Structure formats: C-alpha cells, structure tokens
Image (cartoon, rainbow, N blue to C red):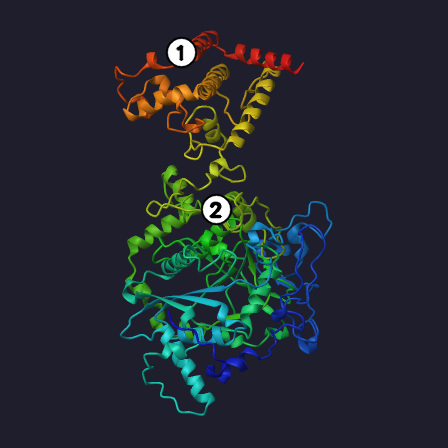
Amino acid sequence: MYARLDDANDRPREYYLLRNMAGPQDDPPGGGAGGGGAKLKGRQGKKKKNNNQGGERPGGKGGKNGQRQQGPGMGPHGRIFLGKDKATFGEDGVGYVPYDPDYECGGPAGAEGRTCPHVLEEGGDDALGLESRGRKGRLLHVGIASYRDPLCPRTLYNMFTKSVEPENIRVRVLQQNDPKLDIDCLEGYCKMIAKAKAESRNEPFDDSAALPEDYAESCPHADQVNIHQVHAREAKGPTWARGLLSADFEGAHASRELSPQDHCMSIDSHMDFEPRWDTKMIDMWDLADNEYAVLSTYVAGTEQLGKNLNGMHEVPHLCMVTFTSNVRTHATKMAQELSRPKLTNAIWGAGLSFSKCHAELKVPVDPHTPYVFDGEEFNRAARFFTHGYDVYTPHRVYVLHDYHGSQSNPTTASWHRNTDHDAMKASHKRLKTMIEMPGGESDPNEALRIRQSKYGMGDRRSVDQLVEFSGVDTRNAKFPVDGRNRCGNLRWVPFAPHPRGVNYVPRYDDETEDPLADHFPTWEDSTSVWYDPSRVAGAAGGGKMSERNTRMKPKEEHAVEEEKEEEEDEAEIENEGQQGVGMNAINIPHRDHEAHDAHENLHRHHEELRRAMREADRMEEEAARPVISNAEAHHNGGLLGGALRGGNGNADGGAGAAIGGRKLIDRAPTAEHGWSHLPLTVQIVAGCLVAGLAVTLYLTAGTGKGALAERYKRRRRKAV
C-alpha cells in the first residue's frame, strides 16, 4: 500500500482553489457541506424540513436573477417533460406536468393510505451505530470501468481535487490497458498532481519525464486507489468489466474494508465533477428519503460544468425504453427545477449509479454477460426493483460525462473487435431468462434456478409488479404495456423488507452460485414473492424437508410449536366436519384428510415416546450411565440404548433424537451387553412404552381422530 500524504503544504494550490470554488450548483448557507439539512424522523407524519431545497443558488430558487422560471406545468417542486409522442401516449401523455413528490407516497402528510419508502430508524440495528443520514462514519467507494482510456487519470484528478473529504474516498479501477501503449490511470493522475505542484511554485515540469519510483509518496490519496489490471486483449465488454468491479466490492466487504452502510458510486472513466461533489451527492441521496434509493441517469456533458441550461436547473431523466436484441434505454427526457430527486419507473443508467453499498452488494453486476451492450441497463434495473430498490433521477448535476472526449477516441470503443458472437448470444439468452423475455432458457426449472441464483432477480417484488410499474412488458416485448406515459409522477410500490434487515447480504455457492444452506429459504419466507406454502407444508406434514428445517431448533421454539399444535388440535375437533380444516390447515395442502390426520397422530405419539424415553433416561441416569458408557466404549448399542442416548449424542434429544440413532443401529450387538443388562426399572418403563405404542397404532388405524378427541377431552377435564 502507498503511504498517505497528509501534509497540506504538499498539495497543489489548485487543490484548494477547486474545493472552494462557488458555482450555480452550490448550496445556500445551511445546506450542502453543512450537513445536508435537518434529519427526518418517521415516514407517515410531518413533511420534511430542510435547509437545502435541492441545492439552489444563494439568493433565490434558480433561474435568472434568482427567480424561478415559469412555464407550462411549472409547479412549486418543478416540472417534468413527458415528450411529444401523441400517437403513443395521447394528449394527456405529452408536454409538461408539475412534479408532485407527495404523490409518490399516495398523498400529502396525514392522507389516508399514505405509504412512503423505508428509511433507517435513528439508532436502529440497521444503522450499525451510525446516524441515519449524512456521511459521518461512512466511506464513499467509487467503481470505475476503464478500457484504454487516456482520460482516466483526469477523472481521478477531478474527483479528488474537487471533493470536500478526499481522504474518505476509496476508488477501484478495472483497468483494461495495453501496458506498452496506454498510460496507467494512477500513474497519470500522479503526474497531473506533480505538474500542478510545479506550476503552483512557478517551477518547470517535464511531462515526458518518468516519475520517480517513490512518486506515490508525494501523490495525495494514491494509497486510496486500487487498480485491477486486465490486459486489453482479454476485455469482454462493459458489463463483464463492471462485473469484475462488483467482485472487487464484494471482496472489500469480506475483508471489512467496505460496510453496507457506506456509500457506493459507479461511473465511467471520463468524468468531471462540480466542486464539493461528494458532499452534494450524499446530501442529494438523503433527500430521496429512501434507504433503498439508487440515483441514476445519463449524466450531462462536461460542457455544462458550472452552468444551468436555459437559465434553469435542468437534468436528464430516464423513463423510456425500446426493444432491440434486448431492452435498451431510449429517448432521454428532462426535468427542470426539481426540489428533490424524482422516482423513476425503474429505468437505470450505467454512467452514474449512487446508493448505499448494500445495493451494490446485493445486486452485483452479472459477470456472465460478456460482449453485451444492449440489455445491460434494464436487466440490472429489473434486479434492483425486484430486490426492493428504487431508481431516482438526480435533481441536480454534480457528476458530468465527457461525451466528446470519449467518443472521439476510436481506441476506447475497440473492445468489440474481439467479440465472441456465440458468447454474446448466450449472454442475451441469460438476460432474457432473468426478465422472462422470449428467447430465454426453455427449461422452466433451469430458468427458475437462474433467476434465484446470485446474479438473478430479487424476491421483494415480482416481475408482474415490474411490468406494471415500469410499463415494460418483457414477456411480449411491448412498451408501454398500456399506452400510459410513466415519465411523470409515480406511486411508490410497497414491499416487505427482508426479515434479516437491509444490510443482510445472502451468501451463495462459489461454483453453482445457488444460495447456501444458511441463506434464509425464500420459499419459507412469507414476505418473499417466491413464498411457496406447499413446500413449507411438505416439511411440516412429513414431506421433503429443507436443510433449514432439519436443523435442531431451540427449546423455546419447541415450546411455541407444541402450544401451537395443541391449539390446532382443538380447532380440528371443533371443526371436524368442515372440509379442508386440519391440524396445519394453513400450511398443509388439501391432500387426503384422514390419511394426514393418521400420519400426524402417529408422529405425535413418536414424539411422546421420545420425550418419555428421555424422562426415563433422567430418572435412571445414575444406573444407566455405566451401561451406556460401556456400550460406547465397545462400539455397541441396541435399539433402546440408542433411543435413551438421543441417537446422535444430544443430551436433550432434539432433532437428532430418532429411535435407534443411525450410528447405533449400524453397530453389531455383542453377547456382553444388551437388554438383559439394563436396570430393571428401565426395562419395565421401556416395555410399557413399547406396548402402549403398539396399542395406539392399532386403535388409531384409519382416521386417527379418536386419539385426538381423547386428548382434547383430557385437557378439558384437567382444565375443569
């Protein structure tokens, strides 16, 4: 690692000039770098109060002479341009509409049915000991995918020199260069720093001279930049490259260098920034008032740096797609004078993505999609949405893109010359499988496995909800699905957060990418869109059990389950004649009712037998211990001996207390130890229990309801 340089005297004069520049995108006193406005509490009550009304220019609300520009559709929170396509959207789907942020929650504060996005509870577990808002205690991680880009060094230079807290920025660059021909991004950045230092001291600087070997020692923040080197000839397109960056973020999280509560940003390698961009981006994210917010758009060009278009705060707004070989973001619209980030119809742009890092960790870019250009963005947008994340259009331009500089250089787009068309075809098939688009995987089981794998869809919202909300009918390759323009005001789609919290990142098998056994099974989680009562019923009713169900449960959980079973028994007797009502009617499919009752009755008698055996074991502990210990020492044990010890060596039986634990049954009995050597009291108790079980099996053959009724009557008599 490079040593960090904190000596202020070694920083170039331009470093401080840029950080203290004022511009039309800056915030008024009390906002921006001052802390991002007042902290919010709750989601159903009072309206937000903040000192930063969207980063307006000091002295007014934007526009010329500090006056808000008026025009068709301009409201107190700005306006949105829907487009001009009357043929597709009709008269109501074109022109300008006023932006109404309250509509996203279903109405103003206090309105019936108002439901707003999820936010961190101040002091709650999900905050990980941090304040719910702001950057205090949080790092800002930036991911940059670069292909032979000579502008990458300038991007680093602009990023660090124009930030408020450069020491809290961590950068990961996926650099796809030809080392013999292309300049290294970090080395180029350090040369720019050295040149700025020389010029600030009126000293000559030879740009062609090699930097000294210890150049990093005098290059501020070089130790905060990680370069992931890949030779240009191995490059497989932007999606593949961003997938490697996602793996780098994952590695940083595993090594505790990155927290889910940090901020993460993904950008291109030819960018510029407004002064104090880092604090402004964080403040803007906070204004979205949504822990699951992702700020994204096709950012403005660098020629707009420090300027307002048409005398207004005008921002690009993504809300349209078209169908090509996949789904492609199309026909960018715009919004003006917005008071806060605007909820979009789940349309995401790869050029800028800003969120909490748990979004990057839970929705990583799919590395199995080499050579893809069309389809990358909507696919990840769909995955964000189904994981519970919401894409917002930034209401101010703080990060800019050098379109002319990047697109005029043919080298930066030459990766496609090595395209493997078979691999590209497979990539598109995979993307289509994810969003249920024609041309995807034909095997429904394999398709479901892919959607539920590491780079698959989320389980907080469904694809049906995605189609309705976004207007993108992936199944029929149609947009819009109903002729309605979704560029305007949208209602937020509620969902149930994961039971393990917003910071929970599921783990997957490194090879198959299927969920690991410790991953909470989505089909057992009633908040999941993949919740499957029939599979839960199979586990509860004696069918195939999941790995999670076969684990030993805590004693408290057993007590709750036994109490629940008694309540269900009573309900079964009282409603004996009703069709479809059983001991586990909620969780068990409507199979043969009597057969199910008999099976459950037998299962409970087995449980009673195991509990009785454990009680006998405790009663005769002193007498039985020598026999059991001796049997263990000689690798011996009979049927009853295994039951007395809980089968798998568990003192309280638990999930492993099956009659005749498998390890003991497999052992051959010897003449030295057996039934006759057990204490007499143990023989009597066990013999009675076995006889009782035989009688029970005989009496309950058929419906099995007699025993249930008898148990119910006994409880009633006991209660009286």
The residue shown at (53%, 50%) is 502
Q: Mark 1: which amino acid?
A: Leu
Q: Is residue 167 visible?
A: yes
Quadrant into which the C terminus falls: top right
The foreground one among 119 and 422 is 119
Q: Nearer the viewer, mark 2 or mark 1?
A: 1
Residue 423 is tagged as none
Q: Relative to residue 21, is residue 427 drawn left or right?
A: left
The residue shown at (33%, 11%) is 676
Q: Position of residue 577 (x, y in %)?
A: 59, 13
Q: Mark 1 Cα within 10 Å, few/some/many (few <14, many 20+)? A: few
Q: Position of residue 675 (x, y in %)?
A: 34, 13
The foreground one among 200 and 719 is 719
Q: Position of residue 125 (x, y in %)?
A: 57, 50
**Residue on which disc 1 sits:** 680
Q: Is residue 225 above or below residue 559?
A: below
Q: Earlier in the sequence, mark 2 or mark 1?
A: 2
Residue 458 is tagged as 2
Identify the secondary structure beneath mark 1. Answer: helix
The residue shown at (43%, 69%) is 224
Identify the secondary structure beneath mark 2. Answer: loop
Quadrant into which the N terminus falls: bottom left
Q: CA distance from mark 2 to mark 1?
A: 60 Å
Q: Position of residue 453 (x, y in %)?
A: 40, 45
